[in-house]
Structures are given as structure tokens and as C-alpha cells.
Image: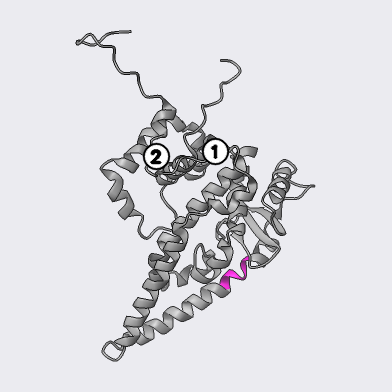
Amino acid sequence: MVSSASGEAPAPEQSSSEYWASPRERAAPVDVARLPDAALGSCRLMREWVALGGALVLLAVVLGVLILYRQNFQPAELGVAGFAIAWVADTALKLLVLPRQVGGAVEITATQFDDLYPVVEELRARFDQPAVRVFVSAEDDLPTGAYGLWPPYTIRFHTFLIGSLNAEEFRFLLGREMGAIRLGHPHLALIFGGQSPAFASALQWILLPRQLIFAWWYRSQELSRDRAGLLACRSVRVALTTLVKVDVRPMGARVSMDAVEPQVQEVAHGRRRWGEALATLGLRRPLLMRRIRRLVEWAGPPEPAPVSPEE
């Protein structure tokens, strides 16, 4: 080892796990390997309720101001009416997603997709799910995810995505959606918005104020789902690798989680922190590096990469 000019030995380099383990939050990371499946409810971020409550208050204030001053601003009354009609129409169109999935997708069962079906059955039992049907299709005009107001709920994945994942990575994605069902996200999404089918896209321009108002709540839900997916696969490295694969497909396999580490730190603590926060104000999903950081803060750094047999 080379000594420094002062004669003192240089400080040891920070290991990968130590670098990841500098949390911003005060709570110690949970041991996800020992966290019971019954703790699924604890995967919900408390800020979900804060974000939803704040959005409802802001929506009420905006509508109240428009109604109060409708006599001085005549288009306001027409705008509120159009906004309400578009909201109801968007809700009605979402009810068509279930028959669309049953009619245009293929269900994962014991006799087809037999490599994925055991994972579906395992998580149904572990998360004490109501009746859930999981579908696969190549349609691009329907968002992937969990839908339904009552059993049987449905979960849809895109074939292109499923084809690039192994069983553990699929377990993470499926755990996200089954966790969403247990946390009540599909029920709330029907009322307050979220991902809408493409045939309702014409309404989204009218409903843009709703997206801006509820965007923080949408992003909070995504972070809660990430925690549920991590509970399903019980591996921080698998969870992070899957997030990267989904976000940068089809080149996700070429990304090293340890190489992503400095970029996550830059977004969390560097000069880009506030710019990144402002850039996500109207987005439904948090940016990839923030999702990675939040999982590491909650469950600790990823496990060491597995050693290949040749090594």
C-alpha cells in the first residue's frame, strides 16, 4: 500500500454497500428478508394520504374560486362543466378495460405460461389475494397494471416486457401489482385518475389540471408499489435490476447496478436534486434514479452481485 506524503496511511475506500447505505431518512432500513408477508400494508408510504388529502383540498379550492367568480369570468362555468363531464367519461371508459383484457389478451394459467403460473399462485397465497387473473398481450393502447373494483381483479403485462425478465424479476413486477390491489390503488384510480386507456386519450387534455393536481399522489403510489414488489422478491438487487430493465429496455441487461450508484447519489444529494424534483411535478411516475434511491433508503443497499461459476 502506498503511503501518503504525511506518512499516514490513506483512508480506506468506501465500499459499495457503505456508499449506498447513507440514508436521508432517520429510520433504519428494514430487513426485507425477514419482513413477513402480512406486513404488506406497511409498504404504503404515509405521504400517499398526505398527497391525496392535499390534492383534494387544492382541487376544492380551485373549483371554489372558479364557481365564486363565474359571473365575472363567464367561460369558468363552461370550463367546470366540461371538466366534470370529461372526468365522468374517463371513469366510464376505464370500466371497459376488463372486458377488453379478457377479449384481447391471453391469461397465465397452469396449462399456458407454465413457467410464470407458479409465481402467480405463490404470490396469490403469500399476499392473501382475492381472485386475481393475470393476462399477457401485445396491445399498446392499454396500460399495464392492476385493474378492477371487485374480484376477480385483473393484472396485465406486455409481452415484450415479460419476455426480457427472469422468474425473480417477474415476481417483483407481479408483487407490485398485487400489492397495489391490496393497498386499494385500483379503486382510487377509477375515481381520481391514473393511467387511462389510449382510447380515452382525447379526454386527457381536458383533464390535464387533474393530472397536475394529483401527480404527487400518483408518484407516491408508484413508490409504495415498488416496496410491495421488493417484499415479493425479497432481494434489493433484483428489485433495482428489474426497475432498470423496465426503464431502459431492451438494453437493461447491459446496465451495472454498481455503476448506476454515483448517478443515484448525484440526483439525491447533488446540484441536480432540486431540478429533478421540479422536473417531475406533472409526471405520474417518479424518475428511475429516485425510485432506486427510495428503495435503498427503505431496505438498505443491494446485495453483492452473484459470482459466476467461471470465477
Q: Is residue 14 above or below residue 201?
A: above
Residue located beneath label 2 in the image: 23
Question: Taking 153 as reference, is 262 left or right?
Answer: left
Q: Is residue 58 above or below residue 68?
A: above
Q: Is residue 163 visible?
A: no
Residue range of the region highlighted in magenta in the rendering: 93-97
Question: Taking 36 as reference, is 19 left or right?
Answer: left
Q: Residues within 10 Å of mark 2 (few under 14, many from 20)?
A: some
User: SS at mark 1?
Assistant: loop
Q: Quadrant of residue 263?
A: top left
Q: Magenta segment, principal secondary structure? A: helix
Residue located beneath label 1 in the image: 31
Q: Which mark is residue 7?
A: none
Q: Quadrant of residue 219?
A: bottom left
Q: Residue at x 39, y 44 (%)?
A: 25
Q: Which of these two is toward me, 59 or 79? A: 59
The x, y position of residue 296, in whole percent, is 46, 39
Q: Residues within 10 Å of mark 1 (few under 14, many from 20)?
A: few
Quadrant for the N terminus, please: top left
Q: Residue at x 58, y 62 (%)?
A: 184
Q: Is residue 122 above or below residue 187?
A: above
